[in-house]
Image (tube, helix red, strand yellow):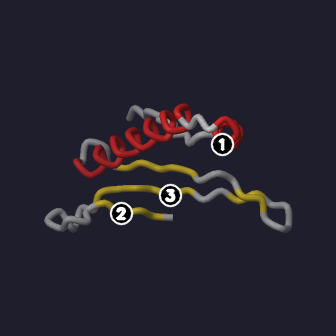
Amino acid sequence: MSEKIIEIRKPTQKQTVVAIKSGDFSEVKKIEDAARQEAENVFHAVASGSVPLIWYDLPPVRCRSGAVSVMRYALHRSAKQRKSKSHCFCME
């Protein structure tokens, strides 16, 4: 089974700060638009059945104890509810 890793990134905090200070959000908007389009492509691939399952991680969060926690999600198409409009499900 071949795995293709697609990285979908939002603008960094530094890019956002530069855009706010300069008033030019064109670079930030371009990154956001590309991320939104790639996310839509991935969702439609799962919804159509051409990709059975995807997984993605949210950015790490540091707890008060100092431990680092990462939340991983999986998006898959339901085998039971093919007739339903909501045939994609997310698992934590």
Real-space CA distance between mark 2 and mark 1, rounded to the nearest whole angstrom: 36 Å
The residue positioned farthest toward the left in the image shown: 83
Amino acid type indicated by mark 3: Tyr
In the rendered structure, which disc, 1 or 3, sits on the residue that comes first in sequence?
1
Residue 70 percent location from the top left of the image: 65, 56
Which numbered tag is attached to residue 73? 3
On the rendered structure, is 83 left or right of 33?
Answer: left
Residue underneath mark 2: 89
Query: Quarter of the image containing the N terminus?
Result: top left
- Residue lying farthest right? 65
Question: Which residue in the protein does label 1 denote?
Answer: 20
Alpha carbon distance from label 1 to label 3:
32 Å
Nearest to the observer: residue 68 or residue 13: 13
Residue at the spot x=40%, y=44% of the render? Answer: 39
Determine contact: label 1, label 3, CB under 8 Å: no
Q: Between disc 2 and disc 3, whose residue precedes?
A: 3
SS at circle 3: strand
The kind of secondary structure element at disc 1 is: helix
Compared to residue 48, the image places residue 38 above or below, namely above
Q: Position of residue 44 (x, y in %)?
A: 28, 47
**Residue at x 47%, y 35% (from the top left corner):** 6
- Percent x, y of residue 4: 43, 33
Q: Secondary structure at mark 2?
A: strand
Q: Residue 51: horizontal and vertical position, in percent?
A: 31, 43
